[in-house]
Image (cartoon, grey):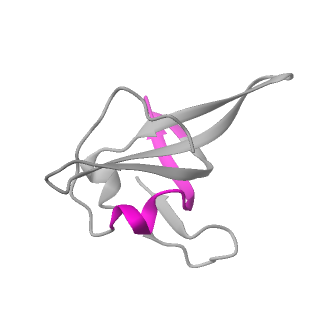
Amino acid sequence: MQTPPMNLVWTKSKWTKAQLDGRRVEFRLRLNQEPLQGFGQFLVLQNPEGLLSIDVVYDFQKSRDEMISRHLCLSQANVDEIQLHDVPALAQFRLFCK
């Protein structure tokens, strides 16, 4: 699994770390007002109070010859939108934000 980023946002979730960590997710988000969509994996950390820091990690083609992994640190509003995917063959979860 990926190394977690240094920025941590602690959130409350109806999902547990065990349910999310390492699971495939289809996402549709906005990053700096630009739409961003694709597939990735959840990377989840839990603090002693039970709060979760949830990232979506996905591969991004930087150039023709270079792929990099990007981490999207999810806000509480994003975390609240995590749902089971209605097509489990694609991904276990979906995260579709407006």
Q: Residue at x 68, y 33 (%)?
A: 60
Q: Residue furthest front?
A: 48
66 versus 69 height, above or below: above
Q: Position of residue 8 (x, y in %)?
A: 30, 35
| Figure disc tally | 0
69 versus 1 height, above or below: above
State which quadrant residue 97 falls in.
bottom left
78 versus 17 height, above or below: above
Q: Residue at x 63, y 49 (%)?
A: 38
State which quadrant residue 2 falls in.
top right
Q: Position of residue 56 (x, y in %)?
A: 49, 46
Q: Is residue 23 magenta?
A: yes
83 sits left or right of 60 in the view = left
83 sits left or right of 50 in the view = right
Q: Is residue 8 magenta?
A: no
67 versus 55 height, above or below: above
98 sits left or right of 68 in the view = left
Magenta stretch in the rendered image: 16-35
Q: Residue furthest right?
A: 65
Q: Residue at x 34, y 52 (%)?
A: 78
Q: Position of residue 10 (x, y in %)?
A: 23, 44
Q: Position of residue 1 (x, y in %)?
A: 57, 45
Q: Residue at x 86, y 22 (%)?
A: 65
